[in-house]
Image: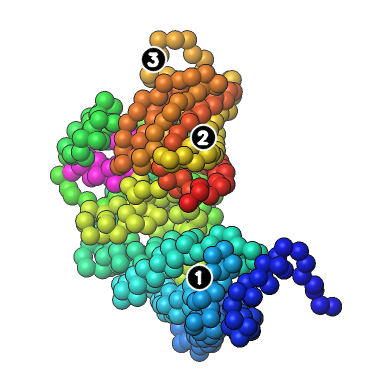
C-alpha cells in the first residue's frame, strides 16, 4: 500500500519543487532516491566489514595460518571495503552538480538537500580515505600478534604511521564539516541521517586519532630503537588525587625491542623525604605550591593534568637514584580489574588469588583491616602490584588473548584509568592528543570538570559518589548561562572501619566523627567562563578562583560527614556553550555520573 503524505510537510516539499525548474526537481527526486539506496548499500557493506574484522582478530592460534596467509579473511574484507567505497562514491556523484547545488542554497527549503549532499560526501571520504589503512592493517597486525605476541605486533605499526595520521586528519575534517550541516530541516529522514552520522563520527574520530598516535609512538616507546625505562605508578583511588589516586606502590618497567620486564618494585615510603626540583611554571606554583608537591610525594599529582605529575615523578626518581626515566605510566586497581578479567587471576605469595572481582576491594578496603602494621600493609600492596603486573606481562605474549586484551585496553581508555607520558618531547606532543595522554585540554569550548583531592588523609574515597549535571540556560550577548550542579555523597559506614581508614591527619579545629571526610573540590569551566554566584546546600558560598591551562577553576574546601550528601551549584556564563561540553572524568572507585542537558540553539 502506498503511503500518502499530508500536512505542512507535503506543502513544503511541493513548494521546494515549485521553486526549482521542473526538470531539476525531477532530477533531484530521482537521484536522491538512487543516492539513498547507494548509502544503504554502503552501510550494509560496512556492517559486514566490521563483523569480518572482529572475526579475524578473534581467531585463535589454531586458525592463525589462514589469517596470516590472508587466503580468507583479508580478501573478504578487501571486497567489502571496495564495495562500500564504490557505493559511497556513487552516492556522492549523484548528489553533486548544478541542480543539487542550487537546491541546497535555497533559504530554509534547501536545508535537507544540503544535509543529504553532506552525508554523501562524508560517506565517500570515510570509505575512500579513512577506513582503508585501518582495515588493511588489521589482518597483518593480527597475524604478527599471533606469531610473536602483542608487543612485537605493535612494533610493526611504525610503517603504518603516515597512513594512520592522514586517516585521522580526514576523519577530523569530515566531523568538522558535518557539524556545519543544518541540525534541523523540514525532512525528518535527512535530520536522522545527519544525527546518525554525527554519532558515528564522535566514536570514529577519537579511534582514528588514537590509532595514529599509537602507530607513531608505540614502536619507539616499546624499545624498537633502544631500551626504554618507565616509572609505573599504582594509584590508590581510596584517597583521591587529581590524576586519580594517591601514588602508592610503583615499579620500573623496561622495554627492549618489544620485550617487557620489571627491574624493581617499591612503595611510596621509599620516596618520602626526597626533594624534586622541577619548574612547572608560575600558574602551577600559584595553584599547588602551598601543598609542596616537590617535597611531599603524596601531593605530587594533585593537578588533573597528568604530564605535571609525570614530570614530578621523573624528577623525584632522578633525585632518589640519579637515573633518568624515559616516561611515566599511571594505573589503578580499576585498570587491573579490567585486565585480570582477560588474563585470569594472579597469585600472591601466600596463595591468595587476585581476581578481576576482588582486586579493587582487596587493595582499597579489605587490606586495611587485614594489616594493622603500616609496613606490612605497604608490603602487601607491593606484592599485589607485582603479582598483577607479572600476570599481565605473561598475557601480552599470549596470542590467544590478543582480541580480549585490546578490548580491555579500550575499556581502560574509556574510563580514563591509564595515563602515559613520554620524556621525549616529540612523542609527548603526540600522546597529549590522545586518550592515554591524561591532559587537561587547553582548547576553547564548553567544558565541565569536577576534580576532588582528599584533604583529610583518610582512605574514605572508596565510599565517595559523585554526580555532575550541566544545564545550559538562556543566550545573551556575552554567551550562555550555565548551571553546574555537583552532588557529593559519603557512604562511609558509621562503624567497623579501621582507624587508618578514618584517621584525620588534617587535625581540623572542629569536632568530627569516624567516617567524616574532607575534600578540596575543584570545578573547571570553559575558557573565558565566569562565575556569577554559587550555593552550597541552598546557601550562598564563596569559592576560591584560580586558573589552570586557560580554564577558570573554582575551589571549595568541603567537609563531608559520613552518610551524607552535599550539593554545590555554580551559576556560570560560558562564552561558547552552543554545544555539549567536554567532560573531564577523574577516575575514582565509583565512576562520575555526568548528565548533560540539551541546549536550544542560540539565535544567529
Give the answer, above or below, for where 387 lies relative to 246: below
Q: Residue at x 45, y 20 (%)?
A: 541
Image x and y of residue 520, in percent: 41, 27
Instruction: Work out whether residue 129 or residue 415 is closer to the camera in this orientation and state it.
Output: 129
Mark linked to residue 483: 2
Measure how far apart labels 1 and 2 are at the Cα level.
37 Å
Instruction: Specify whether 39 is left or right of 212.
Output: right
Question: Does the image show residue 500?
Answer: no
Q: Is residue 463 above or below residue 527?
A: above
Q: Nearer the viewer, residue 14 or 532?
A: 14
Q: Is residue 257 left or right of residue 502?
A: left
Q: Residues within 10 Å of mark 1 (few under 14, many from 20)?
A: few
Secondary structure mainly formed by the magenta segment: helix
> Would you place residue 38 above or below residue 401 in this image?
below
Is 312 situated left or right of 465 in this image? left
Query: Mark 3 = which residue?
Result: 507
Mark 3: give few (<14), some (14-19) or many (20+) Cα within 10 Å: few
Of callouts 3 and 2, the N-terminal one: 2
For the residues labelled 3 and 2, the Cα–Cα distance comes to 34 Å
Q: Residue at x 44, y 36 (%)?
A: 573
Question: Disc 1 or 2, which lies upstream in sequence?
Answer: 1
- Kindly state the secondary structure of the residue where label 3 is placed: loop
Q: Find the magenta span and give its range.
A: 299-318
Outermost residue toward the left in this view: 322
Q: Residues within 10 Å of mark 2 (few under 14, many from 20)?
A: some
Dot 1 corresponds to which residue? 105
Q: Nearer the viewer, mark 1 or mark 3?
A: 1
User: Tag 2's secondary structure?
Assistant: strand
Q: Is residue 303 shown in magenta?
A: yes
Nearer to us of marks 1 and 2 is 1
Q: Position of residue 196 (x, y in %)?
A: 58, 64
Q: Where does the image place residue 33, in percent across and percent down from the top left?
A: 64, 81
Amino acid at each position: 500500500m502506498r503511503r500518502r503524505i499530508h500536512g505542512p510537510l507535503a506543502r513544503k516539499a511541493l513548494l521546494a519543487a515549485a521553486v526549482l525548474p521542473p526538470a531539476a526537481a525531477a532530477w533531484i527526486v530521482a537521484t536522491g532516491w538512487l543516492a539513498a539506496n547507494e548509502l544503504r548499500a554502503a552501510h550494509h557493506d560496512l556492517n559486514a566489514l566490521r563483523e569480518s574484522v572482529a572475526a579475524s582478530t578473534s581467531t585463535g592460534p589454531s586458525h592463525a595460518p589462514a589469517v596470516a596467509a590472508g587466503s580468507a579473511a583479508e580478501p573478504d574484507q578487501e571486497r567489502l571495503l571496495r564495495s562500500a567505497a564504490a557505493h559511497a562514491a556513487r552516492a556522492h556523484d549523484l548528489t553533486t552538480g548544478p541542480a543539487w547545488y542550487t537546491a541546497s542554497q535555497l533559504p530554509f527549503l534547501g536545508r535537507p538537500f544540503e544535509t543529504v549532499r553532506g552525508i554523501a560526501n562524508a560517506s565517500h571520504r570515510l570509505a575512500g580515505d579513512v577506513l582503508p589503512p585501518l582495515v588493511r592493517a588489521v589482518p597483518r597486525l593480527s597475524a604478527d600478534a599471533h606469531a610473536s605476541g602483542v608487543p612485537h605486533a605493535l612494533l610493526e605499526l611504525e610503517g603504518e604511521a603516515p597512513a594512520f595520521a592522514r586517516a585521522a586528519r580526514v576523519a577530523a575534517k569530515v566531523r568538522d564539516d558535518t557539524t556545519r550541516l543544518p541540525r534541523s530541516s523540514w525532512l525528518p529522514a535527512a535530520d536522522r541521517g545527519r544525527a546518525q552520522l554525527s554519532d558515528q563520527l564522535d566514536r570514529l574520530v577519537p579511534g582514528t586519532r588514537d590509532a595514529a598516535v599509537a602507530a607513531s609512538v608505540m614502536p619507539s616507546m616499546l624499545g624498537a630503537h633502544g631500551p626504554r625505562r618507565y616509572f609505573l605508578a599504582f594509584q590508590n583511588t581510596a584517597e583521591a588525587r587529581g590524576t586519580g589516586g594517591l601514588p602508592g606502590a610503583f615499579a620500573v618497567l623496561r622495554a627492549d625491542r618489544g620485550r617487557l620486564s620489571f627491574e624493581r618494585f617499591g612503595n611510596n615510603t621509599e620516596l618520602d623525604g626526597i626533594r624534586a626540583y622541577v619548574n612547572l611554571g608560575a600558574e602551577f606554583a600559584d595553584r599547588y605550591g602551598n601543598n609542596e608537591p616537590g617535597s611531599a610525594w603524596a601531593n605530587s599529582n594533585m593537578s588533573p593534568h597528568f604530564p605535571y605529575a609525570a614530570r614530578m615523578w621523573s624528577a623525584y626518581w632522578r633525585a632518589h637514584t640519579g637515573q633518568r626515566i624515559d616516561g611515566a605510566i599511571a594505573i589503578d586497581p580499576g585498570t587491573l580489574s579490567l585486565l585480570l578479567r582477560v588474563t585470569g587471576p594472579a597469585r600472591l605469595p601466600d596463595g591468595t588469588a587476585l581476581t578481576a572481582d576482588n582486586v579493587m576491594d582487596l587493595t582499597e578496603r579489605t587490606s586495611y583491616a587485614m594489616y594493622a602494621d603500616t609496613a606490612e600493609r605497604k608490603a602487601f600492596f607491593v606484592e599485589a602490584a607485582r603479582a598483577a603486573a607479572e600476570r599481565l606481562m605473561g598475557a601480552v605474549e599470549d596470542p590467544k588473548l590478543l582480541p580480549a586484551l585490546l578490548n580491555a585496553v579500550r575499556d581502560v581508555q574509556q574510563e580514563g584509568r591509564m595515563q602515559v607520558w613520554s620524556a621525549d618531547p616529540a612523542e609527548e606532543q603526540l600522546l597529549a592528543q590522545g586518550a592515554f595522554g591524561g591532559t587537561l585540554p587547553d582548547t576553547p569550548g564548553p567544558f565541565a570538570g569536577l576534580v576532588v583531592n582528599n584533604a583529610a588523609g583518610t582512605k574514605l574515597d572508596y565510599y565517595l559518589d559523585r554526580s555532575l549535571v550541566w544545564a545550559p540556560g538562556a543566550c545573551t550577548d556575552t554567551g550562555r548561562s550555565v548551571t553546574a550542579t555537583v552532588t557529593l555523597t559519603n557512604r562511609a559506614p558509621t562503624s567497623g572501619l579501621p582507624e587508618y581508614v578514618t584517621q584525620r591527619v588534617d587535625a581540623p579545629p572542629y569536632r568530627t566523627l569516624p567516617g567524616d571526610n574532607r575534600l578540596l573540590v575543584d570545578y573547571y569551566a570553559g575558557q573565558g567562563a565566569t562565575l556569577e554566584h554559587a550555593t552550597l546546600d541552598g546557601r550562598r558560598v564563596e569559592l576560591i578562583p584560580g586558573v589552570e591551562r586557560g580554564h577558570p577553576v573554582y575551589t571549595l574546601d568541603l567537609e563531608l560527614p559520613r552518610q551524607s550528601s552535599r550539593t554545590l551549584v555554580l551559576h556560570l556564563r560560558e562564552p561558547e556553550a552552543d554545544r555539549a561540553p567536554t567532560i573531564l572524568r577523574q577516575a575514582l572507585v565509583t565512576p562520575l555520573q555526568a548528565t548533560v542537558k540539551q541546549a536550544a540553539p542560540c539565535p544567529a
